[in-house]
Image (tube, rainbow, N blue to C red):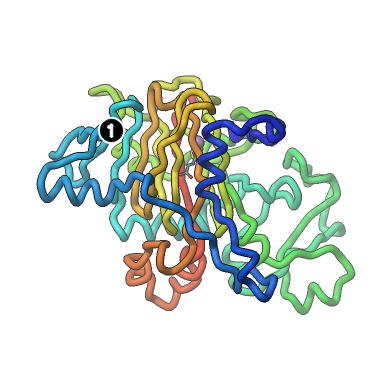
Amino acid sequence: MYGSENNREDSEPTAFRRAEKNYKLYYDNNNAPSKKKKNKQPIPVDLTEVLDFRSILECHHRNSELPNGVIVLQDKFSSPVFNLQNRPGFYFIPGALSIEKQCDLIKESLTDFPQPPNRTNHNAIYGPIQDLFVAANEGKVLVEEKSLVTSNEPNTDLSCRDGEKWKFTTEKEASLRKCRSVSGSSLLRKLRWSTLGLQFDWSNRNYNVSLQHNKIPEALCELAKQLAKPAMPAGVEFHPEAAIVNYFASGDTLGGHLDDMEADWSKPIVSLSLGCKAIFLLGGKSREDAPLAMFLRSGDVVLMAGEARECFHGVPRIFADKENAEIDHLETQLTHEDDICFLKYIQTSRININIRQVF
Ligand code: OGA
Ligand code: MN
């Protein structure tokens, strides 16, 4: 999973790699008088080949027409489900999540989901961090507190070194101490993933059932069961056991990969998109197969089951600029004073929650 092609960089790039490079965010250095990213212009990308299931849906509603190779699975539910003729096991449900659901999931992804015992990419350096989102918004600073470590408090983290303990404190307090520190806002910006349910161990590339974990929250579990239905045989229920939450800022990408650590590939991965629009690449079973590009917007749901589980996929681009992010519906919803911090985050970010049955 999440393997990169870096070790093959000197050889001829694969078709998947070429597509990633084609859609990736590059800045125009020549026209920028200042070196600051803010003043640089993104180099325009040709998006004419990118499949747009929202316009396919609108067109289908108007005149029941579909582009070549696109199949509509069923029309009975409020959200039609699309399949692709040459990618069996791949399902796209445009706008499957209500605006309210999108807002709830964005809030949970920032507050509850990264809470210990769930692990995040920050665990390896700082150990478990409590209340990152709140601390970041309150301008708190994470400082190393060696003195707080007691002998009956074992270090349960896999990689955080013994004797290290990090705690949030005020900026003032942090400046008085001579210890290592990092701002909460910088940690929030660098939050890349959190894991729910059975914990995925990235260093060993497998699920580590001995790591302490909570069950996937009931509401998310129910939602995933409902959404998985089109990809499940009649009468068989999907059992969500693990989820990975990915956080993308402008310029962040998810390289081409396979999710092959689950025992039963007939079960779908249920993948939810929140926040800024992105480009998703769906390749074939080899990196040499040219991938299809498609837009993923906030509220879209993708299912990958069966043969599609063997297809390379990734996210080479998110659109974090106002014109292309397409999150107006979130901006009109997140207007309460308490919601401004969530709106600020999501205006330049994308969150992906992908839910899996492991066994
Ligand atoms: C993943 C994944 C896709 C996305 O996390 O395995 O493929 O839409 N995510 O972010
Ligand atoms: Mn994946």
Q: Position of residue 255 (x, y in %)?
A: 57, 40
Is residue 219 in sight in this rendering? no
Is any atom of residue 314 visible in this view?
Answer: yes
Residue, x 52% and y 46% (percent of image)?
22
Q: Is residue 199 above or below residue 104?
A: above
Q: Is residue 275 above or below residue 212?
A: below
Q: Residue 237: which quarter of the image? A: top left
* Residue drawn at point x = 28 percent, y = 33 percent: 83
Q: Which residue is mark 1?
A: 83
Residue located farthest toward the right when viewing the structure as drawn: 178
How many C-alpha atoms fall within 10 Å of the one at disc 1: few (<14), some, or many (≥20)? some
Give 335 or 118, whichever is nearer the viewer: 335
Relative to the observer, which residue lies in front, 345 or 73? Answer: 73
Badge 1 marks a residue whose secondary structure is strand
Tell me residue 200's x, y (percent).
60, 35
What residue occupies the far left of the structure in this picture? 63
Seen in the picture, residue 30 relative to 252 is either above or below; the reply is below
Percent across and percent down for residue 335 are: 38, 75
Q: Position of residue 310 (x, y in %)?
A: 46, 24
